[in-house]
Image (cartoon, rainbow, N blue to C red):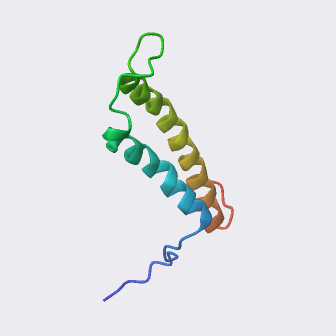
Amino acid sequence: MQEETGAKPPTVTPARVVIALCLIAPFVALLWVSSYAKLEPTFIGIPFFYWYQMLWVLVSTVLTMIAYKLWQRDQRARNGGASA
């Protein structure tokens, strides 16, 4: 038996698609090792392989922040604008 909790069913919205892309992009970029498994170009003497990964640490942080803010806005909209 299914209980009725009053929760709205999950829906796909443009905001949720952007959230998913923000969270998936770092995984795809870093799991595709052959795209960055090289030494050149170097940046201040650091091989590409290393600085590319370190750059993604910063990019991942920004993308996660964007996803979190979009999720908060989406939840407020689903709850009728009530502050959480």
Snapshot quadrant of residue 52: top left
Residue 69, given in percent of the width and then of the height, sits at: 60, 48
Q: Is residue 3 visible?
A: yes
Tally of numbered discs: 0
Residue 21, given in percent of the width and then of the height, sits at: 50, 54
Q: Residue at x 39, y 48 (%)?
A: 28
The image shows residue 81, relative to residue 7, as above or below, that is: above
Q: Residue at x 44, y 17 (%)?
A: 42
Q: Nearer the viewer, residue 46 or 68?
A: 46
Q: Nearer the viewer, residue 49 or 75?
A: 49
- Name the quarter where the N terminus is drawn: bottom left
Q: Is residue 3 left or right of residue 66?
A: left
Q: Is residue 47 left or right of residue 17?
A: left
Q: Is residue 84 visible?
A: no
Q: Which residue reaches farthest right? A: 81
The image shows residue 17, relative to residue 69, as above or below, that is: below
Snapshot quadrant of residue 48: top left
Q: Residue at x 41, y 22 (%)?
A: 40
Q: Nearer the viewer, residue 58 or 53?
A: 53
Q: Is residue 62 left or right of residue 82?
A: left
Q: Residue at x 32, y 39 (%)?
A: 33
Q: Which residue reaches farthest bottom? A: 1
Q: Which residue reaches farthest top? A: 45
Residue 6, given in percent of the width and then of the height, sits at: 50, 78
Residue 26, given in percent of the width and then of the height, sits at: 43, 43
